[in-house]
Amino acid sequence: MSGTRIAVLGAGSWGTTFAKVLADAGGQVTLWARRPELAAAINERRANTDYLPDIRLPDNLTATAEAERALAGAEVVVLGVPSQTLRANLTAWRSILPAGAPLVSLAKGVELGSGKRMSEVVCEVARVPVGQVVVVSGPNLAREIAEEQPTATVIACVDHDRAVELQKVTFNRYFRPYTNHDVIGCELGGACKNVIALACGMATGLGYGNNTTASLITRGLAETARLGAALGADPLTFAGLAGLGDLVATCSSPLSRNRTFGERLGAGDSVAQAQVAAHGQVAEGVKSCSSIRELAGRAGVEMPIADVVHRVCHDGGDPSRMVGALLGREKKAEWA
């Protein structure tokens, strides 16, 4: 698939990194940046000066601040904007999307209000069939991939041939994609792990060690799998890269924005203070914890960790009471 023309819409750290992955796989990539000055800097300095200033970008990757220019002639369209802004951005782009091109979602979240997964938002707004939407999910910390450290991911699509097509477009010497048909499971794994990472960060900020973190990861995976089962996901997905793999990476690494944000909350910062420390960026899980909690409520699924994180982030809850709230729950069998 060398020479495939690809538009990547969104020049944050993950959008830029994924654009680099595609370029290193041989694609002709155009990266859309919201700000003209950032697009110019990428073209002139061969680096994203805002997010990855020390990473040299390939020559077959160019940037533009004009979405129409990025999308002109694109055979693949990658959506690299945050989950809660996807609908608004896609609405603005809908009339200029190339007909029939696969739409690849990088966002990991559940939309506030609607409770829709990102692929559902894409299908609704872009008015495309579900088989045209592809989801990327896995243990994909942007900084490590940008440094070309070996990693694997999942390319999920209900259309197997489409997934294989995108697998070829993304495969390179440091990035190994696997295909999966379970879009629901991959998206839920990617969204829920951000919330569990916030909980792990809080526990770390409170001074707790590896036992607590391991317990939160394991029980968080159980919560995610319960929600997935209720919504029709394949249970095997949660034992794979888009489930356990993504969860471990996000909950364990200081590169994880969600874990780091949670750590500041555990150490005593308010959400506003943690946001200032994160240079104005809010961790995805801060918003997704609410939409996931609502989604679980509709499905009749208990998600106590997500509930506690929501209370800390939005109801003024005290992180120091989080562990007590979880340990004080009714005793039950592990696989109840």
Image (cartoon, rainbow, N blue to C red):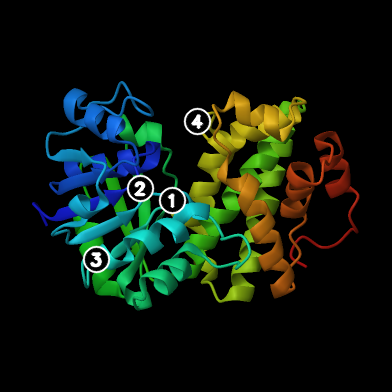
Q: Which residue is mark 2?
A: 152
Mark 4 neighbour density, 10 Å: few (under 14) some (14–19) many (20 or more): some
Q: What amino acid is at disc 2?
A: Ala
Q: Which residue is mark 1?
A: 138
29 with respect to 128 (left or right)? left
Q: Measure the C-alpha gap from mark 1 to mark 4.
A: 15 Å
Query: Which of labels 1 and 4 is toward the front?
Result: 4
Residue at x-position 74% and y-position 51%: 305
Q: Position of residue 142 (x, y in %)?
A: 39, 37
Q: Measure the C-alpha gap from mark 2 to mark 1.
A: 7 Å
Quarter of the image for the C terminus: give it.
bottom right
Res. 149 visible in picture: no
Q: Where on the picture, by quarter, is residue 114?
A: bottom right
Q: Point out which mark residue 255 bears.
A: 4
Q: Measure the C-alpha gap from mark 3 to mark 1.
A: 17 Å
Q: Point out which mark residue 26 bears.
A: none
Mark 1 neighbour density, 10 Å: few (under 14) some (14–19) many (20 or more): many
Q: Position of residue 299 (x, y in %)?
A: 69, 74
